Amino acid sequence: MSLTLKQSWKAYLAASILVVLGILDVLSTNHILAHGGCEANPIMSWLITSCGNWWAVVKVVLTAAVSLWMVARWQYRLARVIMCSATVFYFLVVGWNFVMLLR
């Protein structure tokens, strides 16, 4: 089943927002780390330790890949719920990072 123009527009907008939030998360996390902070997520902490400076590329590429995978499944309600939930979660994470940066 292919998406209508209205559905595909919403799907790609949601994916784009998620990727932009992922990039903002990387930038804010890097700034926090550079100023003596630490990564609270143990999986991301491992990725940062394991990949060095490449962790940001890995994270953004994975975020984009999962987002596009969800776009391909946009006709399913579960995919839309997951994408919207992930967007809200990322928004909260990035918001918290910016609160930490303002301290």
Image: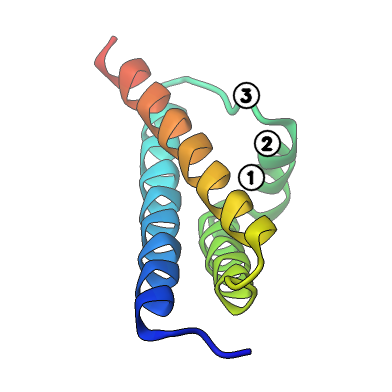
* In the rendered image, the vertical position of residue 89 relative to residue 67, given as above or below: above
Q: Residue at x 43, y 39 (%)?
A: 30
Which amino acid type is shown beneath numbered disc 3?
A: Ala
Mark with earlier residue (3, 1): 3
| Residue 82 locus on image (x, y percent) | 63, 51
Q: Which residue is mark 3?
A: 40
| Residue 79 locus on image (x, y percent) | 64, 61
- Secondary structure of the residue carrying tag 3 is loop
- Secondary structure of the residue carrying tag 1 is helix
Residue 74 occupies which quadrant of the picture? Answer: bottom right
Q: Residue at x 68, y 56 (%)?
A: 78
- How many residues crowd around disc 2 within 10 Å: few (fewer than 14), some, or many (20 or more)? few
Q: Which residue is mark 2?
A: 45
Which amino acid type is shown beneath numbered disc 1?
A: Ile
Q: Tell me if label 1 and label 2 are in contact, CB under 8 Å.
A: yes
Q: Residue at x 37, y 56 (%)?
A: 17
- Secondary structure of the residue carrying tag 2 is helix
Distance from disc 1 to disc 2, alpha carbons, whole Å, reads: 5 Å
- How many residues crowd around disc 1 within 10 Å: few (fewer than 14), some, or many (20 or more)? some
User: Which circle marks residue 48 in the picture?
Assistant: 1
Which amino acid type is shown beneath numbered disc 2?
A: Ser
Mark with earlier residue (2, 3): 3
Depth check, mark 3 against mark 1: the one in front is 3
Compare residues 2 and 90 and report the one nearer the observer.
2
**Quarter of the image with the C terminus in it:** top left
Q: Residue at x 50, y 84 (%)?
A: 3
Compare residues 93 and 35 and report the one nearer the observer.
93
Residue 56 left/right relative to 42: left
**Quarter of the image with the N terminus in it:** bottom right
| Residue 7 locus on image (x, y percent) | 43, 74
- How many residues crowd around disc 3 within 10 Å: few (fewer than 14), some, or many (20 or more)? few
